[in-house]
Image (spheres, rainbow, N blue to C red):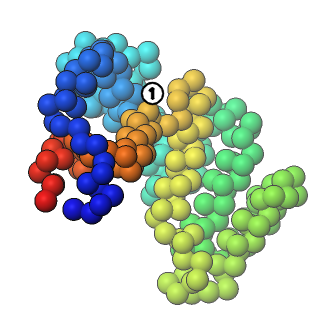
Amino acid sequence: MTASSSSKQTISMEEWESKMSEVPIAKGDLNQLVMNYLIIEGYKDAAQKFSEESGLTSNVDLESIEERMQIRFAVQRGDIQTAIERVNELNPDILDTNPRLCFHLLLQHLIELIRKGEDEKALEFAQDKLAPHGEEHPELLRELEKTMALLAFDTKKSPLGDLLDFSHRQKTANELNAALLAASSQPKEPKLPALLQLLAWTQAQLDEKVNYPRINNIVNAVLEDPASGAE
C-alpha cells in the first residue's frame, strides 16, 4: 500500500450501503429511464414488453419506432435513396429544414457509389446534387473534396478508408435518427449513457480522495468492498 492510499479515508461497505439507503429512488423513475433508453435506441419489442410488465404507459407511439428503425437500417446497409424517400414520406420538413443533414445523406450516397466502383455516376451525382449544396454552404465543401479524393485511390488501399468504414454509415444513421427524434419532440440521446458517464467521472473524483465501495464492472454493477483490495 502506498503512502498516498494509506492516508485516504476508507468508507466501509456497511457505511456506504447505509448512506445509499437514505437516498430516495422511485421505481417509477427507474422505469422511465429504462423506457427512455429502449424507445430512443429503437427496441420496439422490448419497449412493448417492458410497458406491459411495468405498467408504464409511454407517451410515444411505439409503432413509430419501427418506422424510424427501418430508416436507420437503410442507412446502415448503404441504401441511402430508400432512407431519403422514407424520411420524406414520414415528414418532408426534416430534410428541407436541415441542409447539413441532407448534405450528409447525399454525401453518404456518393460514398456508396464510389464503393461500388461506379465512378462516372459518382462524378455526375457530385456535380448535380452535392455541388449546389457546397455553393450555398461553403463550410461543407471540405467534406465533399475529401470524399471526392476517394476516386484517386483503390478503395481497398485508400488512405481515406475511414469514409468507407461501416462506422461512417453509422455516424450518418445516428445523425438522421437524432433528427427524426427531434422532429417528434423526443430527446436526441437516451439518458442512461449520460448517467453512466457521470458515474465514471464521479468515481474518478472519489478515487483521489477516499477508498470506498466502487463499481468496477458496469455490466454487473456490483459494489466491491475496499477492504478486499487492501494489502
Q: Is residue 117 above or below residue 37?
A: below
Mark 1 packing: few (<14 Cα in 10 Å), some, or many (20+)?
some
Q: In the rendered view, does 166 fall on the left or right side of 224?
A: right
The answer to which of 172 and 110 lies nearer the viewer is 172
Q: Amino acid at mark 1?
A: Ser
Q: In the rendered view, does 180 fall on the left or right side of 94?
A: left
The answer to which of 2 and 110 lies nearer the viewer is 2
Question: Horizontal and vertical percent for residue 113?
Answer: 60, 69
Q: Which quadrant holds residue 203?
A: top left
Q: Which quadrant holds residue 112?
A: bottom right
Q: Secondary structure at mark 1?
A: helix
Q: Is residue 70 above or below residue 89?
A: below
Q: Which quadrant holds residue 118?
A: bottom right
Q: Is residue 15 above or below residue 80?
A: above
Mark 1 lies on residue: 64
- Residue displayed at 72% across by 41% down: 98
Question: Horizontal and vertical percent for residue 122?
Answer: 68, 71
- Residue displayed at 25% across by 12% down: 55
Q: In the rendered view, does 95 fall on the left or right side of 140?
A: left
The answer to which of 42 and 77 lies nearer the viewer is 42
